[in-house]
Image: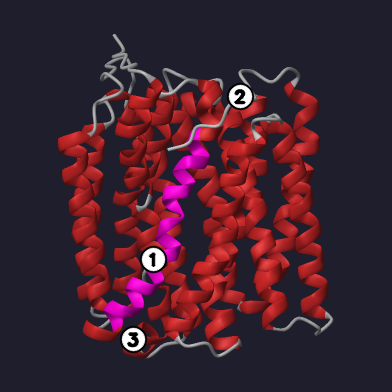
Amino acid sequence: MELVWNPPLKSRQKRILPLLGTLCIITPFAVDMYLPAFSAIAAGYRTTTPQISLSLSTYFIGFALGQVLYGPLLDRFGRKRPLYFGLAVYIVFSIGCALAPNLRSFAAFRFLEALGGCVAQVAAIAMVHDFFQVKESAKIFSLLFLMIGTSPLLAPTIGSAVMGALGWPWIFGLLAAIAFLVLALVFLLLPEGHAPDRGVSLRPAPILAEFRDIAKDPQFLTYTLAGAFSFAGLFAFVAGSPIIFMDGFHLGARAFGLVFAVLVMGFIGGSQANVFLLRRFGSRQIFLTALSLQVLIGICFLAAIYSGIAGLKSVLVLFFAFLSCIGLTFPNAAALALARFSRNAGRASALFGFLQNGAGALISVGIGMLGAHAVFLLLASTAMAGLAILAAGQRRIGEIVDEPECEAALIL
């Protein structure tokens, strides 16, 4: 029997949204806080900055793979027990990263850190469907992104300060401390929104069959894959920004942190503009328009770089516009992809996250191997691939199920 928890909307906003947002910042902090330390970590391990970016790739790979593991667990055991386990794993291997004796063990611990920490975002996405109506979901995702957006504003600056005062290993000690605080908040304040369902099998064959059935849904597959290729531009930015701005434009750690924060304001601004746009337009309209603009900006980016006319100012402007489009595409892709699922929301959100972040992991590997110029090529090509997938998939969907309605925005 599924537990139903349905207090008034304002009460849900005040009590649940901040907790879900706190869960969602685990991975952004793990990614963003150590970016200013790339050069210092490279010097410590006697390697290059692009090689350190491969540790970001191992994190993304662990983050993607872990989601398909936690999806069935979140449906079988409820949301909180898998959260306890995953956050504990994250804490242990964050400390391991701080103590890693060489680059290989550091990259391996980053993989295991992500394997634990990814449960936070999967659970948060699933709990949107536990606590809120489907027609609210695109707005709720946008509001969660407002909270997620605090991490790129704060994390690089915090990481730079910690590195300067104590050394880069303490960045990972701080990540462990933050996760411990989040774990305490989950234990004390977060209600269980989904009763354990013993009917959910944990055997590999039924799990794979369930994922296959979810993936067969045309609406889910279209908006997940189109959204994944759109969202891959954010991974390209995160993985490539230290190489572009610190190695290419020779910015220091503090200047890089400031630039990174300003650019991510584009992503935050796009996600918040989405809340207001949903008053007048449907998620499908917003997604298509934003993705088309993303393609156009990606082409302009590529032309400016390879023609040699792009300087620091133009790169900043184009990145800001590109990330603003992603702020619009992602919440609507998530809402539309997951709209059909309720009882298996944990598995659907896990598969959604796996496909989204798997694409990002491949992007970051490519950047680590090919360098800065790969970033600009990938910005244009991934957006074009997303638009092509959307065009092809819409022919198979037919009628959209439970598309979020255009009603008053939810404001915290």
For label 3, the SS is loop
Q: What stretch is highlighted in magenta?
A: 140-163
Query: Which dot marks residue 70?
Result: none
Disc 1, disc 2: CB below 8 Å? no
For label 2, the SS is loop
Residue 326 in percent (x, y) is at: 63, 51
Q: What residue type is labelled 2?
A: Glu
Q: Which amino acid does label 3 sit on?
A: Tyr
Quarter that holds the C terminus: top left
Magenta stretch contains residue 175: no
In the image, residue 6 above or below residue 380: above
Q: What's the distance in space between the residues labelled 3 and 1, CA to CA? A: 26 Å
Residue behind mark 2: 407
Dividing the picture into quadrants, the one containing residue 317 is: bottom right
Dividing the picture into quadrants, the one containing residue 338 is: top right
> Which residue is located at x 61 percent, y 18 percent?
402
Q: In the shown orientation, is residue 371 left or right of residue 94?
A: right
Residue behind mark 1: 154
Closer mark to the observer between disc 3 and disc 1: 1
Looking at the image, is mark 1 or mark 2 earlier in the sequence?
A: 1
Q: Mostly what secondary structure, the magenta segment? A: helix
Q: In the shown orientation, is residue 327 left or right of residue 8?
A: right
In the image, residue 296 above or below residue 341: below
Residue 77 in percent (x, y) is at: 25, 26
Q: Can residue 195 be seen in this view?
A: yes
Residue behind mark 3: 45
